[in-house]
Amino acid sequence: MLIFANRERNLSDFKKIETMLENPKRYTITAALPYTNGPIHIGHLAGVYVPADIYSRYLRLQGRDVAFICGSDEHGVAISMKAKKEGVSPQEIIDKYDAIIRQSFQDFGISFDNYSRTSAKIHHDTAQEFFKKLYDQGDFIEEVTEQLYDAKAEQFLADRFVTGTCPKCGNEEAYGDQCEKCGSTLNATDLINPKSTITGDIPVMKETKHWFLPLDRYQDFLTKWILEGHAKDWKTNVLGQVKSWLDDGLKPRAVTRDLDWGIDVPVDGAEGKKLYVWFDAPIGYISSTKEWAAREGKNWEDYWKKDDTKLVHFIGKDNIVFHCIIFPAMLKAEGTFIMPDNVPANEFLNLEGNKLSTSKNWAVWLPEYLKDFPEKQDVLRYALTANAPETKDNDFTWKDFQARNNNELAAVYGNFINRVIVLTNKYYDGIVPEPQEFHEIDEQTLAELRAYPAVISSSIERYRFREALGEVMNVARLGNKYLADEEPWKMVKTDPERVKTQMYVALQIATALSVLCEPFLPFTATKLRKILNLETPISWNSVSEEDALLKSGHQIGQAEILFAQIEDSEIEKQVQKLEDSKAANIAAAKTIEPEKDAITFEDFSKMDLRVGTILEATKMPKANKLLVMKIDTGIDVRTIVSGIAESFTPEEVVGKRVTVLVNLAPRTLRGVESQGMVLMTTDAAGNLAFVNPEGENISNGATIN
């Protein structure tokens, strides 16, 4: 059940709204705005853009009023970081990658109705107006708080300008806004052992003024709207993450930042402040809709403020909190917008058994794929959908990609179409024959065909695109089985009149495939329509009707190969690319780090380094990287938590002589106080190794000078 902002509604009102959303008049479909700090890779496609495109194309085939909205997210801290790294301005970065991303989406067939960018004036105006309305309504809390500050860079460290240890899972490479390992959303001040990504220095705390959205005010609203209103129709992974946040209790979240890149905060006393990217970015859906509506002569408010509009956000699981907690709270506070009907977030896609990593170039980049496989957009769309991470993380491998093409698309779908078209041209010069008497198998096959649109629709409308694609392939299998059972190539010698009916039925299946595959394989659908010589598009619902999809006397074209075989050599080339990336990363790990800034003897003498022996070791529960060790330092036996569990088992470390920094200030990791640090290094292959004190006569507690 939907709950709308600042409007009192009785039960009958809600029933009315629910009825409208069962048959919505229009759809607003949003896809997560990609950061313009790099190109698109297969993880983005599988998680967001392919499922969103399938859904939008399907709705259009049904004649629905659809606004499929996206755009470049150009104000994230990642943009500034990329600009600093490359020694150029943020504007140069966003212009470069916006162009690359747009072209990739176009070449890959993602059918956005509008693709905007958050650097556009219409977006700046929209975001500032939104903030100003909430500000004027008193919806923000203004507070002076202490934030992390890099004294050397003379800059506050927002979000990705700071890294450190995640307080929830112990990942030592968490960012100031999010831990990419456990998916937790963080504040920079939550990090343990924070470090500036600008200078590498340890930041200090410094006072600054910011505006906070008091999420706690919307705790009851969000609980009722999501956990009561959508418990049955939202994905369990989405509900689980939202419930975790709600169970912890929502807290005010800053919606402004101290940055030199972004949208100015439009109130007095906010000089030098910018809107937090996760406040500004989702408003990009609204500004992009405004841009589209102005161009198409439509009213944008119909797509964001009318009760009979269905709003759906397609995102990856790392964006769940922002789209299910923060953005809905913003919309509720503003007071005139509808709430999203669903947020069908996918899990992550891995690559060849390892997590996708842009920094390590462990990815399949879309521009490179399109260059290497210029006419195989649909093969990648198929592979990503057939193996979509809808309920759990899944793995993309090049061998599976090849098998999907050769053993499924070519051997099943392509084989059926080729046989139908070749035989029709051979027997009837490409003219659809007049069917004769229908046998039971003909009637049965056509009845089964007419049932498929409803079956596929059911899966799509429940956001089960992998399941829906499987049913589309079952239509091709239906055609192959029909031909294999009927054997028209044999029957033509004994009963040519019977063959007319057989080929007529097979051509109806081929024509249905040109419609039903379009959301998933748009390039294939276009090619098949051309082969079938279909000038007028056929609607989705026509496939369920008894009228012929392809009438007798219609002239079709010649056969073309829909899916060419992918050779082993092509796959080996792609696998080698990844091996080269792996080798480059190992080589980089071997590189000797440059000398750090000079310190004084007094600085060094403050460190108390002692010889110790590990007495006990256990893995930290629910933390893959952390070992909890009891170490005899000669002074005492103390607990030290170290992020080495992925390199060493507890059994391997017990009894080891180690070097311990004993006067490091204690830190609490997942409820365990760590009372020092074990010194580690990396070997030539990039593997962790202990800094072992040498000498049999050295006792625990001996100082290292």
Image (cartoon, rainbow, N blue to C red):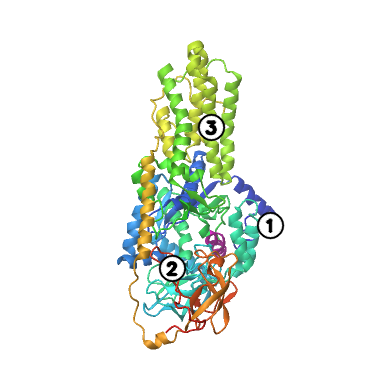
The amino acid type found where label 1 is placed reads Asn
Residue located farthest toward the front when viewing the structure as drawn? 696
Give the quadrant of the C terminus. Answer: bottom left
Q: Is there any visible trace of residue 434 in the rendered image?
A: no
Q: Is residue 67 shown left or right of residue 24? A: left
Residue identified by numbered label 1: 10
Q: Is there any visible trace of residue 158 in the rendered image?
A: yes
Which element is circle 2 on?
Answer: helix
The amino acid type found where label 2 is placed reads Arg
Mark found first going from the N terminus, 3 or 2: 2
**Residue 654 to residue 28: above or below:** below
Q: Is residue 554 shown left or right of residue 88? A: right
Q: Nearer the viewer, mark 2 or mark 1?
A: 2
Residue located farthest toward the top when viewing the structure as drawn? 494
Which element is circle 1 on?
Answer: loop
Mark found first going from the N terminus, 2 or 1: 1
Residue 43 horizontal/vertical position (percent): 46, 52
Residue identified by numbered label 3: 475
Label 2 – label 1 distance at C-alpha: 45 Å
Residue identified by numbered label 2: 160
**Residue 646 to residue 100: above or below:** below
Does residue 333 show up magenta in the picture? yes
Which element is circle 3 on?
Answer: helix
- State the extent of the magenta-drawn residues as a range: 320-334
Q: Are marks 3 and 2 in contact (CB under 8 Å)?
A: no
**Residue 320 to residue 497: above or below:** below
Q: Residues within 10 Å of mark 2 (few under 14, many from 20)?
A: many
Question: Principal SS element in the magenta part?
Answer: helix
Q: Quadrant of residue 139?
A: bottom right
Q: Residues within 10 Å of mark 1 (few under 14, many from 20)?
A: few
Residue located farthest toward the right when viewing the structure as drawn? 11
